[in-house]
Amino acid sequence: MSGKFTAAQRAVINRKSKPKHHGPDDGGGELNIVPFLDIIMNVLIFILASVATIFTATIPVPAPSSGPRPNSQPDTRQRLNITVKVAPNGFIVGAGGGFLMPGCRTVGQASLTVPNRGMPDADGSSHDFAGLTQCMVAIRQQWATEVEDDHSINVSPNGDIPYGVLVKTVDAVRESRGDACRLPENGGQGNYSSPDCLFPEVTLGVLRN
């Protein structure tokens, strides 16, 4: 028998001796995770880019004083504890343990003190801010003795009241003329002596539905 291989036999031997290269569908190869990392990074970048930035605005309101003023006599006058409740259909003003009727000069049962206007303003709000300011003026005239040195007021909006309505409400109860109240700055004293300065010491609350 001859020791030489035929051409066909040599071809078979060469084919069998070559290393087998695994394709991507073969189970024996290593998993390529680079495409998955690319997908994860793209998703993270998209999520970060989609996060909305929340801008907060500050309403400049001085903190009401809680203690007695220096070198002052005890005040025996009853405080009115004025509260403005901002409802979707208008303002409810409380004072002296009751509720003010329309016109803000008499106390009666709970009702809308300043109802909404018929037509909304440019911002889409129907709240009567001018009417609320006139209500504050009427309070200062009707109860001049009780509020002579009292410039504090509580404003409590419903949870669904827009932020813009709250800002305009604070402005409406603060003064009847722009810059009538000089708010304290840098720890200094404010000046509320102007008759157009109404109730600049605003405390904010939230009504629970």
Image (spheres, helix red, strand yellow):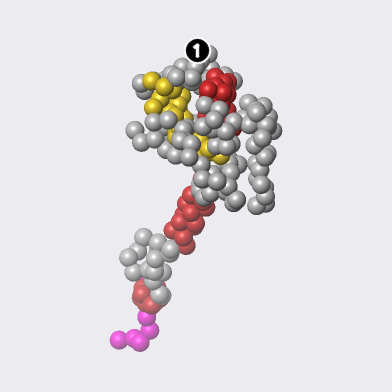
Question: Picture quarter containing residue 206?
Answer: top left
User: Bounds of the magenta span?
Assistant: 1-8
Question: In terms of depth relative to the viewer, which is nearer, 131 or 123?
Answer: 131
Instruction: Locate residue 39 relative to residue 60 in the image: left or right.
Output: left
Q: Residue at x 49, y 20 (%)?
A: 104
Regarding residue 172, the answer to whether it shows in the image is: yes
From the image, give the main secondary structure of the stretch colored magenta: loop
Please state if 184 lies on the left or on the right of 7 as rendered.
Answer: right
- Whether 66 is among the magenta residues is no
Image vertical order of residue 190 relative to residue 43, above or below: above
User: Is 12 located above or below residue 80 in the figure?
Assistant: below
Residue lying at 39% horizontally and 35% vertically, measured from the top left: 207
- Residue 153 image position (x, y, % from top left): 51, 35
Residue behind mark 1: 118
**x and y percentages locating residue 91 in the rendered image:** 46, 24
Q: Nearer the viewer, residue 51 or 82?
A: 82
Q: Is residue 3 magenta?
A: yes
Q: Residue at x 59, y 31 (%)?
A: 198
Q: Position of residue 19 (x, y in %)?
A: 40, 75
The N terminus appears in which quarter of the rendering?
Answer: bottom left
Direction top: furthest residue: 118
